[in-house]
Amino acid sequence: VGLRLRVSGQSINAYLNPTAARGGNDDRQLQGFSEKGDAHLGYTVPDLLIEYAMRNTHVPVGPWRGVNTNQNGVYLECFMEEVARAAGKDSVEFRRALMKNHPKHLGVLNAVAEKGDWGKPLPPGVQGRGIAQFMGYGGNSAATAEVSIGKDGKVKVHRMVLAINCGHAVNP
């Protein structure tokens, strides 16, 4: 029923494009959490609050082939998984209920759930199956992974299924 996202971090724009980081705001930090730009939040939550606190140090930062979309996707989807488990819901069904107004996000989630055998028994040797979805740079993506943890504590990825809807591909 409610989601409060609190984001804090250094602003790349504050160093490289100061006109895009005015008044302590840098929308780039919120990639994947807002309803504008090329990275939209894929969930409809009745009570949504997104807060951002710019915290720049004397050490300048710059683009890193993904900027904020990468970590924001991890943060959000890990949290959605925690909430689904706390609610006693299946991970996919929990997400689907919040994605009714986001058909492209839902499309890639449904694709990997189907092709990734979501809801079916795990193959021998596989201990768990996870799923996530996110939108970044105008493309919707989702993935499911089958994993196990060895006696040595190392994670082994047995299988991944990925889907992307990048829109219309144009060859100029």
Image (spheres, rainbow, N blue to C red):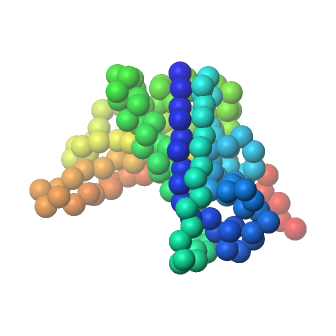
Rendered image quadrant of residue 45? top right
Front residue of 27 and 146: 27
Vertical position of residue 67 compared to residue 102: above or below: below
Picture layout, residue 70 above or below residue 4? below
Give percent across and percent down for residue 82: 37, 35
Is residue 35 something that shows in the picture? yes
Q: Nearer the viewer, residue 125 or 61?
A: 61
Image check: 166 left or right of 58? right
Toward the bottom, the furthest residue is 59
Q: Residue at x 61, y 74 (%)?
A: 62
How far from the left and from the top, in percent, is residue 53? 58, 53
Residue at screen point 75% across, 45% down: 36
Residue 114 visible in the current orientation: no
Q: Residue at x 83, y 60 (%)?
A: 170
Furthest-left residue in view? 151
Percent coordinates x, y for residue 89 in the rendering? 39, 23
Q: Which percent across, then down, holds residue 18?
A: 75, 69
Task: Name the residue: 68% across, 32% down.
Answer: 103
Residue 164 relative to residue 38: left or right: left
Relative depth, front residue between 91 and 64: 64
Say which quadrant the C terminus sits in: bottom right
Count of numbered badges drawn on the protein: 0
